[in-house]
Amino acid sequence: MLDEFMAGDSWKFSESVQRMYSTQPASFVRVDDFMTGEEIERDPVRKSSTAFGVGSHVCTSVPMPGGELILFVFQRWLKDGIYDQTAIDLLNGLRPHLARAGVIAGRLGLERAKTAVSTLREIGLPAAVMSGSGRVLTANPLLEDMAHVFLPTAHGGIALADEPANALFQQAIGQNWDNRVVRSIPVPGTKGRPALVVHLLPLHRAAHDIFSGADILVAATAVGIGATVPSPNILSGLFDLTPAEARLAVELASGHSVQEAAMEIGIAVKSARTYLERIFRKTETSRQSQLVALLKSAWSFS
């Protein structure tokens, strides 16, 4: 039953879990005392536990220094009846020890997450880990030094300095991170900074444990020398190319001449040369070989 609870998302729809989260009891309380009979009957967590033979629940909460909240829940078999006051008093006597254990576990987990993120620093990757709500749990110095790209926001969050890219970034954070979809967001370059791709990767299972229960890994990769043909969508976002310019750029990066690229995408050679001049201006390049080297570094993550 516990494995099912941990693997599923029924707790998100559980009124008993949400009630305890909002109430945050500072001592052990009977959960049913805070709910109506109707709420108990329709609660998916209570339904499954009752079917399994589990009855009375008591709960307490312990706020963590980092802003997390730990809920300790004890349960009894239906046949053993409800928790009486003597049992609750006994649990309240243990509560300080449980609170200390929670704080220590949280700090150890955070240290483990810091170590994992620091490891990414060693391979030159700016990175941070975030909760599903968008709060940064820890970031390595490479990402912290990118103040011109990543901006701090209220409640421990981050934003991208580029407004269009930030709209995609915030939308990605707000989505359901129970799935396994990687999001890659192009960030156009400036005169003082190369173009970037910011990746948001969902953390599951072992990765979720390694990063101390974080939900999202954020990593930034700069445009550099590479050999992979880029995606038109990525190029459009990185260099503000029109769809036609992006398609031409992809063909050029694939090794085609201007004439061959024009034929592939069905435009006149004269139009292709006009597009190429625009691409040169937007990418701050002047030769086709220089352009191709730059384009191949904008890896396709779509």
Image: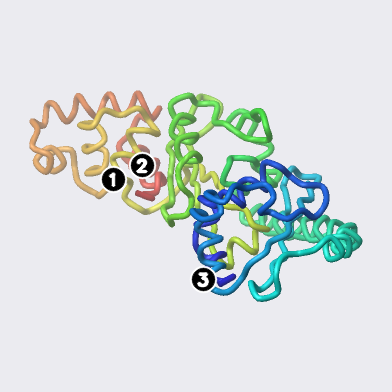
Q: Quadrant of residue 158?
A: top right
Cβ atoms under marks 3 and 2 closer than 8 Å: no
Circle 2 residues within 10 Å: few <14, some 14–19, many ≥20: many
State which quarter of the image contains the N terminus. Answer: bottom right
Rendered location of residue 63, percent (x, y): 78, 46
Residue 127 visible, this angle: no
Q: How many marks?
A: 3
**Residue name at image x 58 percent, y 68 percent:** 206
Q: Who's the residue at 34% across and 37% down the image?
A: 235
Q: Which mark is residue 295?
A: 2
Q: Position of residue 196 (x, y in %)?
A: 48, 38
Front-lying residue, 56 or 243: 56
The amino acid on which the numbered mark 3 sits, given as a three-letter code, is Ala
Identify the residue at horizontal 58%, vertical 74% (top origin): 53
- Where residue 179 sits, quadrant-wise, is bottom left
Residue on which disc 1 sits: 253
The kind of residue on which mark 1 rests is Ala
Left or right: residue 58 compared with residue 241: right
Q: Mark 3 — residue?
A: 51
Going from the N terminus, do you reach mark 3 or mark 1 first? 3
Task: Tell which circle, 3 or 2, labels the residue nearer the N-terminal end.
Answer: 3
- Residue for point 50% across, 40% down: 173
Whether the residues at callouts 2 and 1 have beta carbons within 8 Å, the answer is yes
Asked whether residue 279 is in view, the answer is yes
Question: In 3D space, how far apart are the residues under numbered discs 2 and 1 (Cα atoms)?
Answer: 6 Å
Task: From the viewer's side, name the closer residue of 118 and 251.
Answer: 118
- 100 over 225 or under it: above or below: below
